[in-house]
Amino acid sequence: MIERLDAFMARANAAYYATHDPFADFTTSPEISQVFGELLGLWAAVAWGILGRPRRVLLVEAGPGRGTLMADALRAVGQAAPQFRAAISVHLIETSARLRALQAERVPGAIWHDGLATLPEGPLLLLANEFLDALPIRQFVRRGPRWTERYVMENCSRSAELFEKRSVESEGPAARYRWHERELPDPPPYLLSDGEWGNTPPNVVENCEAARRFVGDLSARLARHPGAALFLDYGAEHPPAGDSLQAIANGRPADPLSQPGTADLTAHVDFAALAAIVRDAGAMAHGPIPQGLFLARLGLFQRTRRLAEAQSPMRAAALVGAAQRLAEPHRMGRLFKAMAISSSTSTVPPGFEP
Ligand code: SAH
């Protein structure tokens, strides 16, 4: 069997999220510090104010993981913005039944969706952390004057079983799948023009059609209904750097093809490409800006210090350390970016002021 990379990645990640606790393998910002989710909740409260405080508003999270971010956000707005809290109905976009069950424990009363299409009409605020990076990508390779596309090829017929198995190391899984390239009659879609590449164009270019569709559909909705959305994810500066596909299995980097279904596959988010889609759909894009700058502007360190005052010295040091990990440039502060989308009639959302 031969599968295009995006189909392989979608199948591998669906199997992974259906069977694994991803947080045994990697840690995300909301799991590092409670202040992360609290600040995003307060961001939504301010955005609600900008919308003119509608009486009912959907608070949506895409890819909520364990539900930690939403639980922290709701606790913070319950204390700081009770009127906003009373206006909210919570909607979670999640495809993994296993993670939906975890989310139900932390966010009772939420309503689940497979995608944007089934969300009710009305004003909307959407949060998403490390959601876009999990969506399947295509990869194109420059071979001299021509281009090829990457596919994944099965080496033996038993490999379908790998998706159901938890551990296949003993069977030498690396040999089960290998890369395959097919020549393209035309250059890949969305290829940047020469002037846009800066110094040297990379030999591999990627595009994530699922992210383009999600952001395009969301922007079309925001062009029709008032609202705002906030995405935090990792992605290099523009222009994108080339092959960014990575796999994490058992907490360590792995070969993307060696353990499908037991490794988390992600790729960098091309925020510049997504911002262009937002504008084409008639909504406004803000950023991307570095996560560290965004969180500092929202008051990460002030809030952390206030929280730490009431704690034991050890717990206080842990809270401050966690905030530093989220914001310091050589840690998560620079590679991670924040980008917002808003209806064209609204003003700039908090944190994105020029
Ligand atoms: N936001 C969380 C989890 C990030 S992991 C955190 O920061 O901790 C990615 C999340 O996106 C998981 O909840 C995963 O199940 C979900 N996900 C992945 N692909 C998806 C898709 N196509 N549609 C909906 N949810 C998806």
Image (tube, rainbow, N blue to C red):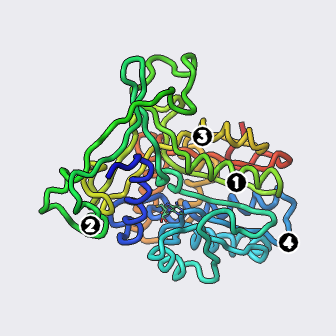
Which residue is drawn at the image coordinates 47% and 78% (left, top)? 102
CA distance for labels 2 and 3: 42 Å
- Which quadrant of the view contains residue 271? top right
CA distance for labels 2 and 4: 51 Å
Amino acid on which disc 2 is placed? Glu
CA distance for labels 1 and 4: 21 Å
Q: Which mark is residue 161?
A: 2
Which residue is drawn at the image coordinates 57% and 54% (left, top)? 300
Q: Which residue is mark 1?
A: 218
Q: Quadrant of the C terminus?
A: top right
- Lateral position of residue 275 relative to residue 4, left or right: right
Q: Which residue is mark 4?
A: 55
Q: Is residue 309 visible?
A: no
Amino acid on which disc 3 is placed? Ile
Vertical comparison of 258 with 61: above or below: above
Taking the view exactly as shown, the residue that stands out farthest to the left is: 170
Q: Earlier in the sequence, mark 3 or mark 4?
A: 4
Is disc 4 placed on a helix, strand or loop? Answer: loop
- Lateral position of residue 138 relative to residue 43, left or right: left
Foreground mark, 2 or 4, reads: 2
